[in-house]
Image (tube, grey):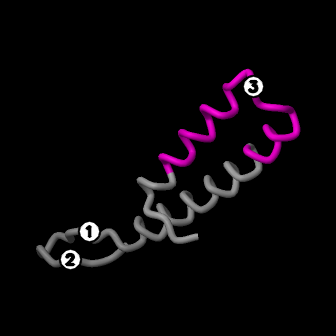
Amino acid sequence: MNLTLEEAFEKLDEMAEQLESEDITLEDSFVVYQKGMQLLKYCNEKIDAVEKKVLQLNEEGELREF
């Protein structure tokens, strides 16, 4: 999967709308839910990777990763 976080969040929003629809079958809702959970996992991993790259300013004014 090679989506930006913004694209992933858009897809999650679309999936939520599908799940809220009265026209979706139970079987389809399980498929959408499963894909949504995989997408959430991808988002969490992407956010974790970004957090590790965030630089922190130390007392001497130097940047260091945390």
Mark found first going from the N terminus, 1 or 2: 1
Figure check: 3 above or below 15: below
**Residue 42: which quarter of the image?**
bottom right
Q: Is residue 29 magenta?
A: yes
Classify residue 43 as left or right of residue 30.
Answer: left
Q: Position of residue 61 (x, y in %)?
A: 11, 73
Foreground disc of the pair 3, 1: 3
The disc, 2 or 3, on the residue closer to the chain's N-terminal end is 3
Amino acid type at mark 2: Leu
Q: Amino acid at mark 1?
A: Gln
SS at badge 2: strand
Disc 2 to disc 3: CB gap under 8 Å: no
Cα distance between the residues tagged 1 and 2: 6 Å
- Distance from Cα at disc 2 to Cα at disc 3: 53 Å
- Residue 3 left/right relative to 66: right
Residue farthest to the top, as pictured: 22
Image location of residue 5, percent across then percent down = 44, 57
User: Who is closer to the viewer here, 53 or 21?
Assistant: 21
Q: Residue at x 49, y 48 (%)?
A: 9
List x then y, in percent, for residue 32. 73, 45
Q: Residue at x 16, y 78 (%)?
A: 62
Task: Label 1: state its secondary structure.
Answer: strand
Query: Depth check: 19 or 43 in front?
Result: 19
The residue wearing badge 1 is 56
For label 3, the residue is 23
Q: Nearer the viewer, mark 2 or mark 3?
A: 3
Name the residue at the front extreme.
23
Residue 63: give its label.
2
In the rendering, at what x and y percent does residue 30 appear? 82, 42
The residue stretch that appears in magenta: 9-32
